[in-house]
Image (spheres, grey):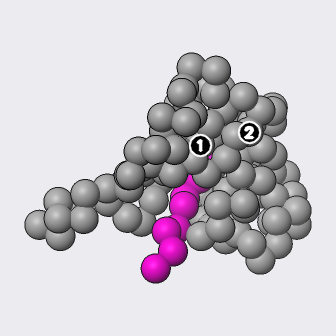
Amino acid sequence: MPVTYRVVLRSTETQPSRQTQESVLPAMSQKFGRRVSIEAADIAPDDRLRATVIGTVDTDSPPALRDVYEYVKPHRLVRVKEILTDDAGGVVVRKAHEVDRERVERHERATVLADVRGDLLVHVAGDESAASE
């Protein structure tokens, strides 16, 4: 069964607004189409002074995940807060120059998903026995 990746997007603005959502999320939807599922988050008045989550992008395609990350990385209004998975593992982001890629690729629980603008996206599979307990 394929893993679903969820990219959590946060605003870079000190006072995030619906205008950010209304400009960024539809543009992403148009760019990525059916390869991803995009959902806007509710922005409560109390959240406006923090690094607010403005939405999420879900995909089960590593190439689509790479494309979303590549689109967001240089963006002025939003950043990737975290990348979650629906399995017991997760996705970590490391600077490519700080990682021994061959060693990562030899690890049985790690899969390099993408190398994007100097960042390495690595899916680390969780311990199945721990997930079922």
Residue under pointer 1: 121
Percent of width and height locating residue 94: 55, 30
- Looking at the picture, does residue 24 appear above or below residue 97? below
Q: Label 2 sits on what residue type? A: Val
* Residue 85 in view: yes
Q: Where is residue 32, by image quadrant?
A: bottom right
Q: Earlier along the polypeptide chain: callout 2 or callout 1?
A: 2
The residue under the point 65% across, 61% down is 62
Q: Where is residue 64, by image quadrant?
A: bottom right
- Residue 78 as seen in the image, left or right of residue 81: right
Q: Residues within 10 Å of mark 1 (few under 14, many from 20)?
A: many
- Quarter of the figure that contains the C terminus: bottom left
* Magenta stretch in the rendered image: 1-9
The residue under the point 38% across, 52% down is 109
Q: Label 1 sits on what residue type? A: Leu
Percent of width and height locating residue 77: 77, 36
Q: How many marks?
A: 2
- Asked if the residues shown at circle 2 and circle 1 are in contact, with their CB atoms under 8 angstroms apart, the answer is yes
Q: Is residue 6 magenta?
A: yes
Residue under pointer 2: 116
Along the line of sight, which residue is nearer the eye, 116 or 28?
Answer: 116
